[in-house]
Structure formats: C-alpha cells, structure tokens
Image: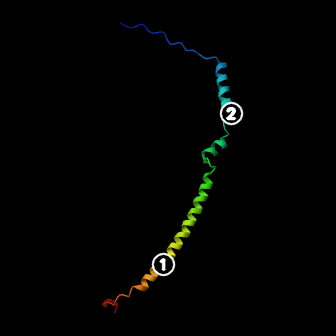
Amino acid sequence: MSRPRAPPPKIVQEEPEEIEDEEDEEMEEFDEGMDMFEALGSLLATEDGETIATALVSLKDAAEKIALNLEMHNKIMVKIAAALNKMVPAPPPTLSDA
C-alpha cells in the first residue's frame, strides 16, 4: 500500500566560468551607468534646471513680498479705523461713568 518513492530531482550545477561571465557582464553594465551624483542631481532638479535650493530662495523672496504687503495693508486699515472713529460721535455718558 505504500507508493514507490520518486527518484530525487537531479541538481544541475552551472560551471563556475558561466557564473563569473554573468558577474562580469553585470559589472560592465553598472560601470556604463550614470555617475551617482548625476543620478541624484537629476532627481532633485526639474527639466528647466531649477533645484530645491533655487525653489527655496524664490519662496523666501515671495514670503518677504507678502510680509511687506501685509504691513502696508495694516497701515491702511489703521488709518481707516482712525477716520471712522472721528466720524462716529462719542456715546453719551452713563451713570457708571460719573
């Protein structure tokens, strides 16, 4: 009732020369590739050549312009508030003021 055992699978071993040839080919492909700094540079730059550093500088300049505009806006709002206060008469005195 027991089945006969199947013969063990044959293990085919590659010759060491073939393995070395494959490693040599892989190394040649790697050597022909891009320089690591060039690869990193291409990841961190746009097609126009803009890098992270130039983008941060332009953001800094834009933030400074926004700050200057907000300062001017605040000065204008203070002048408008002062003009409106002059137009509105003072409230009548109440008993708690006396």
Residue 62 position by quadrant: bottom right
Tell me, yes or no, whether the two marked residues, 2 and 1, touch with CB atoms within 8 Å: no
The residue where tag 2 is placed is 32
Neighbour class for label 1 at 10 Å: few (<14), some, many (≥20)? few
The type of residue carrying mark 1 is: Val
Residue 17 position by quadrant: top right
The relative height of residue 38 versus residue 53 in the rendered view (above or below) is: above
Judged from the image, the secondary structure of the residue bearing numbered disc 1 is helix
The residue where tag 1 is placed is 78
The single residue placed furthest to the bottom in the displayed view is 98
Image quadrant holding the N terminus, namely top left
Q: Is residue 42 left or right of residue 83?
A: right
Image quadrant holding the C terminus, namely bottom left
Question: How does the figure colour the protein chain or chains?
Answer: rainbow
Sequence-earlier tag: 2 or 1:
2
Q: Residue 34, how many percent across, how many down?
A: 66, 38
Neighbour class for label 2 at 10 Å: few (<14), some, many (≥20)? few
52 or 20, nearer to the observer:
52
The relative height of residue 58 versus residue 75 in the rendered view (above or below) is: above
Residue at 43% in and 82% down: 84
Judged from the image, the secondary structure of the residue bearing numbered disc 2 is helix
Q: Is residue 25 left or right of residue 74?
A: right
82 or 94, nearer to the observer:
82
Label 2 to label 1, Cα distance in Å? 67 Å
The type of residue carrying mark 2 is: Glu
Q: Residue 13, how many percent across, how many down?
A: 59, 16
